[in-house]
Every structure is written in C-alpha cells, then in structure tokens.
Image (spheres, helix red, strand yellow):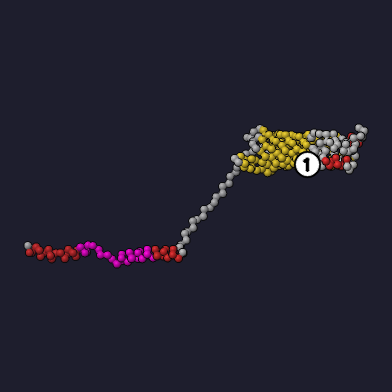
C-alpha cells in the first residue's frame, strides 16, 4: 500500500506538466489587439460626445439629387373643322356711321378645307325702318341737327344688303378649362370680295321735291363692288355648336347725285351662331 501511494505522488507533477503543454498559454499579441480595439471604441465615443457638446456635429452626407424628368405629351384636339361645313345666322350693326342706325340680319356658310383655311360665303339684309326725317328710327340725333338747325345736307346712304365670298385663315387655336369641360377656340382673319346695295336718303339730300329723272333720283339705288377685310374669334361649346364674334370692314365707292364720287367704309360688328356638320371623324 505504501508503495502504491508513493508512486501516485511521484506521477502527479508529470501529469500537470503534460496538461500545461496541451493548453496553450495566452499570448501577448492577442492581449494587445483587444486593448487597441477597446481604446478605439472609447476614442470614437468620446469624439462624438465632444462634437455634440461643441455643436460641431459631423454633417450628414447629402443625398444625391434626383433628376426631374419632363414628360411631353400631345393632347388631342377636342374640336376639329377639317372637311366640315359651318352654317348659321348672324346679327350685327354698322359701328362707324355717324348719321344712321343700321342693323343687319344675315347668314354665314363656310367650308373648311383644312384646319386653318376655309372658303366663306356671307349674305346680309338691313331693313329700312323709316322714310327719313327726324322721326325716322334710322336717323341719329346728329342727322336731325344738321338738317333742321344748320341747314346742312348730310350724305345719308343706307346700307340695305351685302354679300361676299372670302378666304378665312385661322392660325391660332387654343383650349380653356371651364369646370370639368374643355372649351376650344380659334382666332381667324378674313379677306374677300363682294357687292353692297345702298339707298340714298332723299330727304337728307334735300332732293325729295326733285323730279323722278333728277340727278339724286338717278343714283338713289346703287350696287357697289366691295372689298372686305376682317377677323374674329370662334368658340366651340361642342363638336357641333359654336359662336363667333367678328369685325369686318367693307369699302366701296358711291356716286352722290350722279356727279360726285365718294369712298365709303362700313365697319360691321356682328355675332354668329354656327352649326357644324357632318360629325367629327
């Protein structure tokens, strides 16, 4: 027994040496790496705290700007005139006659060969409301004053009818939003040729007592070749209905009392209601 105990006691140091040899001891390099990482973390935390306290926090990196894309679209026209007919009544008046009130009833017919160009035919009639004199509703106050107070014969020539053929040019087109509706419009100009019928007022010319073959009677009724220029705007409320407002200038040469030539210009302001057919394709 004693011999067994002694052998165990002697073998214990040997076993301890073998265990130390098997388990690797911590090296200095591993300890140094761990210390460096701890120091770096502490320094970064400290630097962030110091920046916050001093108000010099590191600015955030700006996000890259996004480029705005412009998408171009072509909106379809809501109102087309190509190869369509336009017809409707008109109502107007002569705006530049200082002696007479002339109201005009007429009609307009257009054929739109393209969206820009159209051939236009117009005709109108202006009724004679009186037979002359201060009680005549056609006379303006200036006519009565010149004749009765100043003994002056104003050259009063009533426009009674006119007709013309013209070319319409509509280069400007646009749209306006009205609530949930889109209203289309265009602006146009017109040039043309036509004829104008007139009737001289014999009372204003102080020739009512003249014989039927007198100079004033011979040129009382006349038809004049006429040039026309004008323009206006068309507003379409649907594909079939539109309204127009236009101004046109009619120029012609008139003979007064069979002897005197006088150039006349009538500036007509009128409004039309137009109906288009056939329907849009």
Q: Residues within 10 Å of mark 1 (few under 14, many from 20)?
A: some
Which quadrant would the N terminus be assigned to in this image?
bottom left
Name the residue rendered at 81%, 41% in the picture. 97
Percent position of residue 177, x then y: 62, 42
Q: Nearer the viewer, residue 89 or 54?
A: 54
Q: Quadrant of residue 157?
A: top right
| Residue at 66% over, 35% down | 241
Give the magenta-colored segment's residue range: 19-44
Q: Position of residue 52 (x, y in %)?
A: 44, 63
Depth check: give the residue in front, 103 or 16. Answer: 103
Q: Is residue 221 magenta?
A: no
Between 37 and 214, the one lying in front of the other is 214
Residue denoted by label 1: 95
Residue drawn at the location 9% of the way across and 62% of the way down: 4
Give the residue displayed 65% in from the left and 34% down from the top: 240
Q: Where residue 179 sits in the image (x, y, percent)?
A: 60, 41
Confirm whether residue 224 shows in the render.
no
Left or right: residue 236 compared with residue 65: right
* Image spot of residue 149 (x, y percent): 88, 42
Name the residue nearer the viewer: 247 or 122: 247
């Amino acid at each position: 027994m004693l011999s067994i105990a002694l052998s165990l006691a002697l073998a214990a140091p040997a076993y301890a040496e073998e265990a130390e040899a098997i388990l690797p001891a911590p090296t200095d390099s591993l300890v140094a790496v761990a210390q460096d990482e701890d120091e770096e973390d502490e320094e970064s935390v400290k630097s962030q705290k110091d920046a916050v306290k001093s108000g010099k926090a590191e600015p955030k990196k700006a996000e890259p700007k996004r480029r705005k894309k412009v998408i171009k679209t072509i909106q379809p026209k809501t109102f087309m005139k190509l190869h369509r007919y336009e017809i409707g009544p008109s109502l107007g008046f002569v705006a530049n006659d200082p002696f007479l009130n002339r109201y005009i009833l007429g009609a307009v017919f257009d054929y739109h060969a393209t969206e820009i160009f159209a051939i236009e035919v117009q005709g109108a009639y202006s009724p004679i409301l009186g037979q002359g004199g201060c009680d005549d509703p056609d006379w303006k106050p200036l006519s009565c004053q010149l004749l009765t107070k100043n003994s002056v014969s104003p050259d009063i020539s009533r426009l009674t009818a006119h007709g013309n053929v013209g070319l319409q040019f509509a280069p400007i087109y646009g749209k306006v939003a009205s609530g949930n509706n889109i209203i289309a419009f265009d602006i146009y100009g017109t040039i043309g040729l036509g004829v104008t019928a007139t009737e001289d007022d014999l009372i204003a010319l102080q020739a009512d007592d003249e014989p039927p073959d007198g100079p004033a009677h011979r040129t009382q009724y006349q038809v004049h070749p006429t040039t026309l220029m004008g323009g206006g705007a068309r507003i379409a409320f649907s594909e079939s209905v539109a309204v127009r407002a236009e101004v046109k200038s009619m120029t012609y040469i008139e003979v007064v009392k069979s002897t005197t030539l006088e150039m006349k210009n009538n500036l007509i302001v009128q409004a039309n209601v137009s109906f288009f057919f056939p329907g849009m394709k």
